[in-house]
Image (cartoon, grey):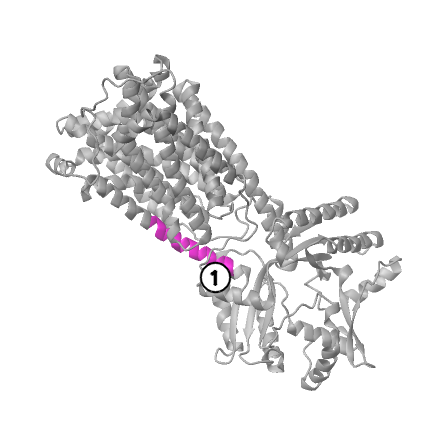
Amino acid sequence: MWSFLARFSLRNRRAVILFFLLATIIMGYFASQVKITYEFAKLLPSDDTAYVDYQSFKNKFGEDGAVMVIGVQDPNFFELNKFNDWYDLGMDIKKIDGIKEVVSVARIYTLQKNDSLAKFDFKPIFAQKPKTQTELDSLKKEVYNLKFYDGFIFSKDSNATLMAITFDKSKLNSKNRLAMVDTIKLRADAFEAKHKVKIHISGLPYIRTVIARKITGEMGMFLGLAFLITAIILMVFFRSTTPVVVSVLMVLIGVIFSFGTIVLFGYKITVLSGLIPPLIIVIGIPNCILLLNKYHTEYGKHGNQARALARMVERIGISTFFANVTTSIGFAVFCFTNSKILVEFGLVAAINVMLTYITSLLLIPAIFSYLTPPSIKQTKHIDNPLITKILLKIDYWVHTYRRRIYIIVIGIVAISMIGVSLIKTVGFVVDDLPKKDAIYTDMRFFERIFHGVLPFEIDIDTKKPNGAMALPTLYKINKLQKVFKDYPEFSKPISSVEAVKFANQAYNNGEPKYYMLPGASEMANIAGYAKNANQNKQGTFKSFVDSTKQHTRVSIQMADVGSVRIKELLHELRPQVDSIFDPKVYKVTLTGNSVMFLKGNDYLIKNLQESVMFAILLISLVMFSLFASLRMVVISILPSIVPLIITAGLMGFFGIPLKSSTILVFSIAFGIASDGNMYFLTKYRQEFKVHHYSISKTVSKTLAETGVSMIYTAIILFCGFGIFSFSSFGGTAALGVLISVTLLVSYLSNLILLPSFLLSLEHRLEMKAIMREPLFEILDEDDDIDLNDLKLKS
């Protein structure tokens, strides 16, 4: 097969180049249509109970993550000019297309008892801007008497107030949200600049918008850095612009293909898929290095360019094929997680790793066949004295100090296992952002004053029509709200109970002491007044009861306390909920974005842990298909597992939590690290017969032949993945650092530990394993091939 591909790419070089040119143009067209997602990632499968419950809740009561908040803490907030500007700010924002409602102290309503018509009238506190400070002071007292809004819109104790902005669902998950958020922030910033008061902005629509922007910006930054760093390193290695330009061209085609694949599959750019293009650069460059190193080595032996290019494909094609297969497996295992965001990431990455490999394998010989043969200067890097000295030292160590090597490795692994035991599994909604980021600090402001901005919802099914407004149900809800009041992680609940309390206060002429649930007789009178009220005039009192009045909701905002604390809270709250609402009579569901985050985080971690084991299994099967020996599988897999244990230990010692972003390290790194095993072992098998089954000579020759390319590859991978450490997302930065360290240790392990294992095997057993026929034949280096007289036509 590889001989056929070598001849095909050289004999049809013009057609090969034209094919990839046309394919790149077509994929470039699709790539130009790539879009970024504006929705929260779907982490749970559609049949998951938590997901089904959440969708059922949204179908009854609407989107729970559609509110953006603007907050300010100022003891002088109720100064006439400042307050009137706040009034104007709310009015201006309400006029923005796509804004459903704006609620603030300047845009709140009260209820007035209308005895003549036996109904409640909704009355705005501020029908217009107050004209004098005396008028404003009087209205301020009226505002502060409305206990419904205390802790929800304002906080008397902390001199803070907020503006709650509700987005229309149709615009919330579209590109229009960017312009809407920009306009709101621009006007809020103007208020801040004019009055010299700090404005805080938060809420899921705002957080999602800023993160979407960061994804777009960082994707461009990573692409630029990846191209720059790999080009510089290649220039240092090859000391010639031609290999650098061609290598960069190969991965550029890969990047275009990856964007095009995303569009063809109907996907959009997410925080994960945005990493694929720079990953393709980092992973694709080693293919070019291995191919070009072999080309230069072969040409240096006999000076025949055609033969050198053909041997490049024949000799390196098989090892790079299986190396790229193992890398693809590291990504493809995410397709078995049933998580939409991971499936998209794994599928697109796996496909484009192989596409980039095929592009390099066919296009490099075709392009170089038109170029002049490499000069002595261009092939000088093959005999780099420093690298040669390092490889000779390694060869000496593995032959002389194997026992010491094993003792050191066992000691490091033992220490790492201590670190593994210290790993904590925890995730936060905004923990990927720096602690000084405005999103983080503003969220902490709302947590400190209003106890959070993340939606936590309680769906109460009374199992009978009209049961939601029955007085016993209301009293149970009130009792439940008192339970939540004891937890500082939760804000003041908003529910039908609060609306009834508000109505009771209005029924008793606005006296604050009557902000409480009424008795049965008063409840009947209040119900009559409320029935006649025109509720369409006020958006604040949104529906808390479904159309059948069987379901009701309790809406709470909560702090970003992390997945561990949320789990503890749910565990503590469930028995208390069931003690109030008998499960035989009621069905109470705890849901909302906060619960979905916890469930999604747990689901991802569980599936990613399984994907690591699946990757190890699949890559072991690939190794077995090559060597048909369980012994060879074990000695090939161990050098890649040891670095994973070391990385996990470092995570424990340095307090890096195990979460969805950091656990990606293990399957990705294992897949890429197995490349080094593949390079070494395929070459080892080729050399074994040549050196008459001498393990010592074979190891030395394999180290000398593959060592240069493996060191080059390790440097490229270390620096390439290191670019992600510049991310403003903590998870992405940790991913880059951890993979860089893991791959560096992996390649050291492949150069030191793997040869030591081979040398430690008994000669008879090793020969038996190597001589066994593999499922895939690996060409011997000295096989006669019909290329000695092959020439390239000018």
Residue at the left extreme, as displayed: 764
Q: Residue at x 70, y 86 (%)?
A: 521
Q: Which of the pair 330/665 is nearer the observer?
A: 330
User: Residues in magenta?
Assistant: 596-613
The amino acid type of the residue labelled 1 equals Lys
Q: Position of residue 537 (x, y in %)?
A: 75, 68
Answer with left or right where residue 698 lies relative to residue 545: left
Whether residue 564 is visible here, answered yes or no, is no
Indicate the quadrant where residue 781 lies.
top left
Q: Residue at x 65, y 70 (%)?
A: 543
Please tell me whether residue 610 belongs to the stretch shown in magenta: yes
Indicate the quadrant where residue 100 lies.
bottom right
The quadrant of the image that shows the C terminus is top left
Please tell me whether residue 581 belongs to the stretch shown in magenta: no
Q: Position of residue 500 (x, y in %)?
A: 68, 75
**Above or below 689: residue 536:** below
Whether residue 664 is visible here, answered yes or no, is yes
Indicate the quadrant where residue 515 lies.
bottom right
Q: Residue at x 33, y 17 (%)?
A: 793
Q: Which residue is label 1 attached to? A: 567
Residue at the top extreme, as displayed: 376
